[in-house]
Image (tube, rainbow, N blue to C red):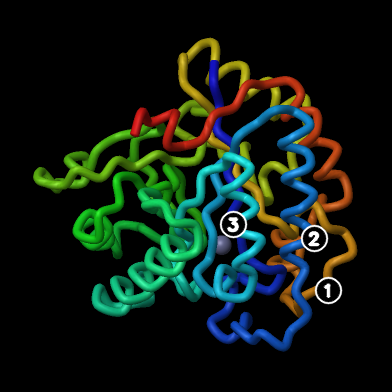
Amino acid sequence: MNNVFTIDTEDWYHANFEDDLFTNDSNIISTVENNVDRYLELFSQNDIKATFFVLGFVVEQHPDMVRKIAEEGHEIASHGYGHQLVYKQTPEEFKEDVYRSKVLLEDCIGQEIIGYRAPSWSITEKSLWALDVLDELGFKYDSAIFPTKNFLYGIPYAPRVPHNASVYGKKNLHIITAPPSTRKIGNFNIPFSGGAYFRLFPEKLIEHFTDYVNEKEKSPVVFYLHPREIDPKQPKLKLKWKDYMIHYYGIKGCESKLIKILRKYEFVTMKEMLNL
Ligand SMILES: [Zn+2]
């Protein structure tokens, strides 16, 4: 079974806990290149091609890094330009943000960009109009709807496998949604394959859930991490206790967990998994 590894390619300070937290300031020290280099090394050692959802702001600051990712055979997709939550923008602002990132990325690597992931999975019931905008801009897939529910994101009834927009009452769109993976237990979809969940859960549990989704449900698992999640030495944001835990818990042990997952499973890019 082929799984998918994805990296939301942004800097250590891109976060959405509070509106005024992050700032796109090129004078702030950046850690993204060093962290991405480490991922590229790990992917190369394990002969894995991944999908990198790159922020437009990051491609402006680090074009050579983005070209290097593409040259090594990984897929480049869009993470928008400015890391604003989709549901806090108007459709017009969202369109401008995503279009800007698509053009920057396409100019940088000379290839069409067909995939999009929203900052903090922020396509929710409040912002399903975003699917129309993405379709109009020529995106063929999004990975932006989390089939769960928490304080920041999620549509609990969203399908757990790739699906088209007719699920949301949109009949004429071509865009496919490829969600991050969950393990369904009773009425709950439990996230496990990325971010804070990946850092929090023991690796045996992540493997157990992955095996279940692969073997029993015959579905690929979509993993996701950020560059900063394997970097214990990164500068730290001043966050409230709960947000701090979500943002930083388990970073020390994350890389060794990642290495075991990369060694154990097979991976293709999102584009390949979706046959696009
Ligand atoms: Zn992000």
Q: Point out the image quarter for the C terminus.
A: top left
| Residue that carries the numbered disc 2 in the rendered image | 34
Above or below, 54 against 237 in this view is above
Q: What element carries label 1?
A: loop
- Label 2 SS: helix
Q: Where is residue 59 in the image (x, y as percent from the top left)?
A: 56, 68
State if disc 2 and disc 3 touch (CB < 8 Å).
Answer: no
Q: Residue furthest top?
A: 215
The residue at the point 42 percent across, 60 percent down is 106
Residue located 62% across and 80% down the image:
22
Residue 160 relative to residue 71: left or right: left
**Which mark lies nearer to you, 2 or 1?**
2
Checking the image for residue 235, the label placed there is 1
Residue that badge 3 annotates: 67
In this picture, is 213 found above or below 228?
Answer: above
Q: Which residue is drawn at 48% across and 61% down?
A: 79
Which quadrant contains ligand 1? bottom right
First in sequence: mark 3 vs mark 2? 2
Which of 103/97 is in front?
A: 103
> Could you tell me if residue 93 is visible in this image?
yes
Give the side of residue 8 with respect to residue 245, left or right.
left
Q: Which of marks 2 and 1 is nearer the N terminus?
A: 2
Residue 44, position as x, y percentages in the image: 73, 35
At label 1, which amino acid type do we have? Pro
Q: What element carries label 3?
A: helix
Which residue appears at 44% of the width and 28% of the height? 273
- The crowding category of the residue bearing disc 3, from other C-alpha atoms within 10 Å (few below 14, some 14 to 19, many at least 20), is some
What amino acid is at disc 2? Asn
Is 94 located above or below residue 261 in the figure?
below
The image quadrant that residue 136 belongs to is bottom left
The amino acid on which the numbered mark 3 sits, given as a three-letter code, is Arg
